[in-house]
Amino acid sequence: MRLILSSQSPRRRELLSSCGLSFEVIAPKVEEFRVRGESPSQMVLRLARMKADRVLSDLQDDSDCVVIAADTTVVAPGGKKVLEKPKDIADAARMIRLLQGRVHHVLTAYCILARTSGKTVAVKRVVKTAVEFRRLSGKEISAYAASGEGLDKAGAYGAQALGMILIRAVRGSYTNIVGLPVAELLEDLAPWIKVLPRI
């Protein structure tokens, strides 16, 4: 079965590779935007489905395949405001100040489109992880923002690298924070893709 990751994210590629899966990457050509009035969960679900649909529709043949697409966002304390990628270092520092000493949530939605014998089955899921930041000094916030690590990430931080120093606790899937909830994804892929343990 041909497995395709519809993503430009190197972190998603790394997570899927670490599972021992063979796959190809096709970056989706879509314009990401928010729809007025939609919740953060609705937004990430819509964007994940849109990315998967685009790649599946662009394939030149009708062969059997499984397409995976995902979208991740950070929801600020309070549960309503979405923190997207920062515009610059100052914006990154603003976001870290907002998150420090508090609990926020990371939402990742993924969409699986499995096409077999000309029929397509869609599986969608949103996974939510609570992340608690420790209290940070102004110097720590400025130094992390200036590192540039968070400039290409929703919420202005990366949990898998230097950003680990910001985090006090994680409740839920850690890989979800990085960009792909691996355990949940593998459960939903099981009807089409077999994952063998590395022994």
Image: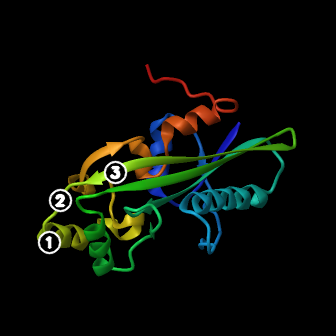
Q: Which residue was labeled with disc 2?
A: 135
Q: Is residue 165 above or below residue 153?
A: above
Q: Is residue 156 above or below residue 55?
A: below
Q: Secondary structure at mark 1?
A: helix
Q: Is residue 116 above or below residue 99?
A: above
Q: Secondary structure at mark 2?
A: loop
Q: Which residue was labeled with disc 1?
A: 138
- Which residue: 48% across, 35% down? 19
Which quadrant would residue 141 be assigned to in this image?
bottom left
Q: Is residue 117 left or right of residue 46?
A: right
Q: Secondary structure at mark 3?
A: strand
Looking at numbered disc 3 in the image, what kind of residue is underneath it? Val
Q: Measuring from the top left, give residue 137's x and y in whole percent.
A: 13, 67
Q: Is residue 153 visible?
A: no
Q: Measuring from the top left, give residue 29's x and y in whole percent.
A: 65, 68
- Which residue: 64% across, 63% down? 28
Residue closer to the observer: 121 or 136: 136
Q: Nearer the viewer, mark 2 or mark 1?
A: 2
Colouring scheme applied when the structure was drawn: rainbow
Looking at numbered disc 2 in the image, what kind of residue is underneath it? Arg
- The label number, if any, that marks residue 121 in the structure image: none
- Which residue: 43% across, 54% down? 106
Residue closer to the observer: 108 or 89: 108
- Which residue: 45% across, 24% down? 198
> Outermost residue, front direction?
78
- Label 2 vs label 3: CA separation? 13 Å
Q: Measuring from the top left, give residue 78's x and y in whole percent.
A: 40, 62
Q: Quadrant of the N terminus?
A: top right
Q: Is residue 52 left or right of residue 187?
A: right
Q: Which residue was labeled with disc 3?
A: 131
| Tag 2 near tag 1, CB within 8 Å | no
Q: Which callout, 3 or 1, points at the residue further toward the start of the chain? A: 3
